[in-house]
Image (cartoon, rainbow, N blue to C red):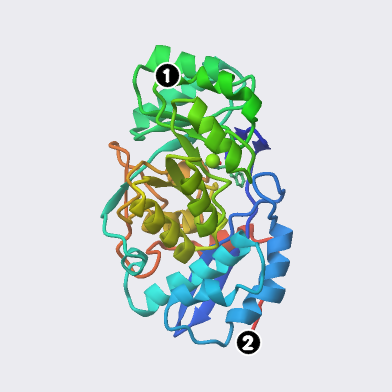
Amino acid sequence: MAFFETSFGRVFDKTFILVSLDGEGVQGLGECVADVNPYYSSETNVGAWQVIRDFLAPLVLGRTFADPREVFPALARVRGHHMAKAAVEMAAWDLAARARSAPLSRLLGGSRPEIASGVSIGIQDSLEDLAAKVTTERDAGYRRIKIKIKPGWDVAAVEMIRARFGGIPLMVDANAAYTLADASHLAALDRFDLLMIEQPLEYDDVRDHAALQRLIGTPICLDESIHSVRAAEEAIALGACRIVNIKPGRLGGHAESIRVHDLCAAHGIPVWHGGMLESGIGRAHNIHLASLPNFTLPGDIAASRRYFVPDLIEPGIEVSHSGMVTVPTGPGIGVTVDWDRVKAATIETCDVRA
Ligand code: NPQ
Ligand code: MG
């Protein structure tokens, strides 16, 4: 993939754990969205590998679950490690859906046949480069554009896009690059009619976001801070956000994501599906989850080709010219894995049995 830069750094490739779970005569797949470094969150591949092998796998292998909703509670003894848990839990959902020959979306409670796709544009070397990227993505049909911002790459970037591209659906994501002391600077974004500003403040903060939301007009969307249902309840109670980004990796899987989705729906808070530079396997999971009714805003679920050529699935995830992605209708996640490609990219494997 080409580089992708956020306020926490620039990446050129992705190394991740794929979890394959056997049971009921079928195989379920889950993708761990942790990275090699603990920059987006505290989890890493090496840590997740150890936690899955030594602590999570023994809690699920050889056991019978009547419903995949029982998996996350079964992992409760392990604290944190939501990305590691999600990889296992989501594999269990895929397995359960395949065992019932049903698309995953049906088990999750989704009904939309297609989902709206947005795109996330990283920090560029120049405003000219940014303008070129926005042109490409707008012309590809994406339903909204998000740009990554950080101090020194914010107001001027948004101003340029508004000047050159008019009123396109636009939002910004700071990945926790600011503090409450920057409130008046962030208020300078109010005049650009942004859909939202995502995670402006600390990754674990709720209180200061609530204070900031009282000082700026742009709706705040929380990403990193929403690590649990409880965190979402606190954020809503304090008025820390008007929109929530749901990532199953951050929450510990599909079941917890559905709980946050339902909580937000009950409070009139729209949600959208975030992205973690997943391969087609994780991306397919996201598409099924995003088919639930309160995912009313376009998600960071772009085409495979934006990140991985070729992808681990064949065909890859496609986005239509009107910015829509079809929810697969086959069993489970409903995509075809190119196992030769997976094998060629595999660094290490580990087999755990009951
Ligand atoms: C976000 N993603 O919404 C994340 C951040 C992100 C598509 O903007 C490796 C692993 C690289 C996780 C880069 C998007 C990553 C990553 C960005 C997550 O905040
Ligand atoms: Mg984000």
Whether 88 is drawn above or below 303: the answer is below
Q: Picture quarter containing residue 162?
A: top left
Task: Work out how far the residue at label 1 is from the one at label 2, CA to CA, in angstroms.
Answer: 56 Å
Q: Say whether residue 52 is left or right of residue 99.
A: right
What residue is disc 1 on? Answer: 192
Residue occupying the point 63% across, 56% down: 16
Residue on which the image places disc 2: 354
Residue 274 lies left or right of residue 77; in this view the side is: left
| x 62%, y 43%: residue | 205
Q: Position of residue 72 (x, y in %)?
A: 53, 71
Q: Give the camera-side residue of 199 and 115.
A: 199
Q: Could you tell me the amino acid type at mark 1?
A: Phe
The location of residue 295, given as percent across then percent down, is 35, 49
Out of 297 and 119, give the one closest to the viewer: 297
Mark 1, ligand 2, within 8 Å: the answer is: no
Q: Position of residue 129 (x, y in %)?
A: 54, 20
Circle 1: element type: helix
